[in-house]
Image (cartoon, rainbow, N blue to C red):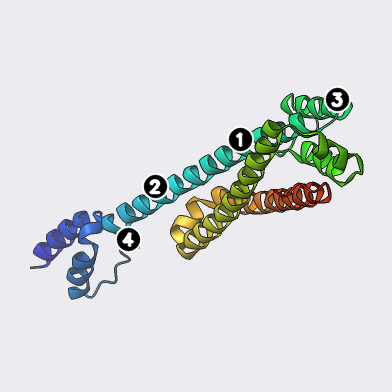
């Protein structure tokens, strides 16, 4: 009898190595008065964690793609405004700052896209100057239409940045709510938090540029 019990225990020990049978094995072992520590994760829970991680990583990639696309539109809009509004000397300075950022000198980036702080600052400075009034008065019909189009683009960029920040916040909360996944995606959480701060800062810069553009045009009697 004792020999049979030993054989049964050996068979159950082999089955215990499979998480799927962990609960049943525990019951059988307990029948012999033996306490067994079974695996904390079943094959099903491990599979579900992988599914969750894959889905969350896909969302992170999607958010980064939206940042890149929105920032590209922003950069193009800044270039258009600069070409239509800035005097020759200031346009030259603007292009130099842009080239410097592209080459990596004093460059700050969000996932590969330059944060156009210098270029935005250059435009804001001009729009606050008295000479901007004369510039708006000299604009051709085509240039006025271009500036109006640029304003619409800036508003779209601002809205997109705000939406991206909210999506990132929600995703971060979801990841943190799942401790197992949060441990695996620790570095991704850090990236998301940094991105939220950077994009929020950039969104505020866009809003400031929008206000300055509208006010400067209005002072020249040009309603955007």
Q: CA distance from mark 3 to mark 2?
A: 51 Å
Mark 2 or mark 4, whichever is nearer to me:
2
First along the sequence among labels 4 and 1:
4
Q: Going by the image, does 45 lie left or right of 64?
A: left
Are the residues tagged 3 and 4 within 8 Å (C-beta)? no
Whether the residues at callouts 4 and 1 have beta carbons within 8 Å, the answer is no
* Element assignment for label 1: helix
Q: For numbered disc 4, what is the local secondary structure?
A: loop
Quarter residue 168 falls in: bottom right
In this rendering, the label closer to the viewer, 4 or 1:
1
47 w.r.t. 2: above or below: above
For label 2, the residue is 54
Q: Which mark is residue 103?
A: none
For this rendering, which residue is in front, 29 or 97?
97
Residue topped by disc 3: 88
**Cβ atoms at labels 1 and 3 below 8 Å apart:** no
Q: Badge 1: few (under 14), some or many (20 or more) residues near its Cα, within 10 Å?
A: some
Q: Secondary structure at mark 2?
A: helix
177 with respect to 89 (left or right): left
Q: Are marks 2 and 4 in contact (CB under 8 Å)?
A: no
| Residue bearing the label numbered 4 | 39
Q: Nearer the viewer, residue 198 or 191?
A: 198
Relative to residue 152, is residue 167 depicted above or below? below
Tell me if I can see residue 132 in this picture. Answer: yes
Q: Residues within 10 Å of mark 2 (few under 14, many from 20)?
A: few
Which residue, given by chain and number where applicable, does mark 1 sit on? 72
Estimate the spatial distance between the alpha carbons at disc 1 and disc 3, rounded to whole Å.
24 Å
Circles 2 and 1: CB atoms closer than 8 Å:
no
């Amino acid at each position: 009898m004792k020999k049979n019990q030993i054989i049964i225990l050996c068979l159950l020990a082999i089955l215990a190595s499979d998480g799927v049978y962990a609960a049943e094995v525990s019951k059988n072992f307990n029948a012999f008065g033996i306490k067994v520590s079974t695996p904390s994760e079943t094959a099903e829970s491990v599979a579900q964690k992988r599914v969750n991680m894959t889905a969350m990583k896909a969302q992170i990639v999607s958010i980064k793609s939206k940042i890149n696309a929105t920032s590209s539109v922003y950069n193009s809009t800044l270039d258009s405004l600069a070409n239509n509004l800035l005097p020759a000397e200031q346009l030259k300075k603007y292009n130099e700052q842009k080239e410097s950022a592209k080459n990596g000198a004093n460059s700050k980036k969000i996932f590969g896209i330059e944060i156009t702080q210098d270029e935005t600052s250059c435009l804001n400075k001009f729009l606050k100057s008295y000479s901007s009034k004369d510039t708006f008065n000299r604009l051709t019909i085509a240039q006025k239409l271009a500036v109006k189009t640029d304003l619409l683009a800036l508003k779209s960029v601002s809205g997109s940045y705000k939406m991206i920040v909210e999506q990132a916040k929600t995703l971060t909360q979801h990841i943190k709510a799942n401790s197992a996944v949060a441990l695996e995606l620790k570095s991704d959480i850090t990236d998301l938090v940094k991105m939220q701060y950077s994009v929020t800062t950039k969104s505020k810069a866009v809003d400031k540029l929008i206000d300055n553009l509208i006010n400067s045009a209005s002072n020249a009697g040009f309603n955007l």
